[in-house]
Image (tube, rainbow, N blue to C red):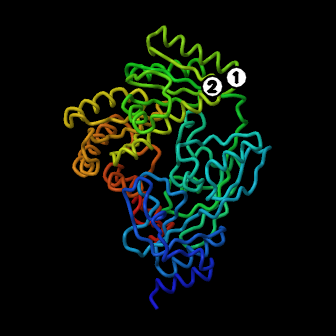
Amino acid sequence: MSRFHELLAELSTLLGATQVLTDQDLSAWEWDWRKRYRGRALAVVRPASTQEVAAVVKACAQHGVAVVPQGGNTGLVGGGVPDESGQQVVLSLSRMRKVRALDTANLTMTVDAGVILAQAQAAAAEAGLLFPLSLAAEGSCTIGGNLATNAGGTQVLRYGNARELCLGLEVVTAQGEVWEGLSGLRKDNTGYDLRDLFVGSEGTLGVITGATLKLFPAPAAKVTALAACQTIDQTVALLHRARQHLDAQLTGFEIMAEAALQLVAQHFPALSQPLPPAPWCVLLEASGSEAACRLAMEQVLESALEAEEIHDAALADSLGHAKAMWHLRESIPLAQSQDGLNIKHDVSLPVSAIPAFVRSMGQRLSDALPGVRLITFGHLGDGNLHYNVQAPVGQEAAAFLAQHEAPINAWVYDEIMQLGGSFSAEHGIGALKREDLATRKSAVAVDMMRAIKRALDPHGILNPGKML
């Protein structure tokens, strides 16, 4: 009997045969969300507890078989799917969906790693509290995956990335041991911060099985508005103005280029767009007391109109109206997916450098590739742009990608690095950007990362081929 057959038999004994999938259609676990990467799994295993995760990892380590941790499989860089060898075990956390504890006095919630983000939000809301992490995939992405990739989303401006929203972790090591680090403390200076090693490590250092999360008092109200700008410089000026008027009440500041909203209109014509087409639309959100937020938002829009930073605006007058505005923003990635494969860039820059990047890169791409569509949107408030390049209308998307992805990536990343930015803001490295990390990160930084990987996973069984 081969080591693979021995391992599968052992896993079936540990979890039960129904939780070790081998002969079924495994495409849901083998394809990444963007349909760019497809691997072939030896098996998909679905443990129901931390102890079962530990037993699976220990068995795989003993048989020398790699483990690929997977949450909701909504990642955008190919970090959560197996390779094509058929010799890796996909470890799905999908059955681990318990909210373990909610401490209203300490403003914390402890959850299994497989808890869906929307489930965590709902659990906090039922207690009259807020878990502020929010992103388009929140109906299917998981807390473990959010932490493994240090997810960002639409409220980073006020609350920070997933890292800032996590106080403690429970992690299964590469040896199948369990690190119990589910602390709800805000202050704990007892040695190295192990939590921060695992947040953002994309399953390459350990398997996150549980997390203690920060909660916040629920805001009394949210006020949402859309504004139209002629230039990218005006969107930055509007951000400065919004910060002055709203201060900490400003929770969201998203920009959407005209081409992005045109794509939404093309693929989702039923969605209403409150403003006529404009080169740039800005989605603003403030949270706090209803009267104070609305008054401050009105002052932002009125003064921006007077200063000619915007030329049109719409203030949501109901929760449904606000949701419709956000639905436009959240539909852009879906519209892109329906339109075909595209060249995605998840980049960050100092906010002050964004107009220069958008102008220079837009000119370069338009000159080199007439008709190319620049689907630019993202979280201007924290300097994170989704700078995506779509084939010209009528040109086959896959062929465009095959011919132009490498040079376009080089142009974009070179410019980003020159301006003091990062080629990965919130999506992670995965398989897609592994070579860029090796060549664009400093040699000292990469050497330290490799040393950490060797120390925690000496046999390289955790998500091999990802990140490093």
Secondary structure under tag 2 reads strand
Q: Residue tagged by mark 2?
A: 223
Judged from this view, the residue extending furthest toward the bottom is 1
Distance from disc 1 to disc 2, alpha carbons, whole Å, reads 7 Å
- The three-letter amino acid code for the residue at tag 1 is Glu
- Marks 1 and 2 in Cβ contact (< 8 Å): yes
Q: Nearer the viewer, residue 309 or 22?
A: 22
Q: Nearer the viewer, residue 281 or 51?
A: 281
Q: Is residue 461 above or below residue 432?
A: below
Q: Give the class, few, some or many, for how many residues have Cα within 10 Å of label 2's Cα (few <14, many ≥20).
A: many
| Residue at x 50% of width, y 52% of height | 149
Residue 71 horizontal/vertical position (percent)? 55, 59
> In this image, 200 relative to 215: left or right?
left
Q: Residue furthest top?
A: 306
Determine which of the numbered discs, if any, sits on residue 290 in the image.
1
Name the residue at 46% across, 71% down: 461
Q: Please determine whether, in this image, residue 385 is positioned above or below residue 90.
A: above
Question: Where in the figure is residue 46, as x and y percent of width and height?
Answer: 59, 69
Residue at image coords 64%, 29%: 319
Percent of width and height locating residue 260 = 39, 34
Any mark on residue 12, and which?
Answer: none
**Up-down: is 147 above or below 132?**
below
Callout 1: helix, strand or loop?
Answer: helix
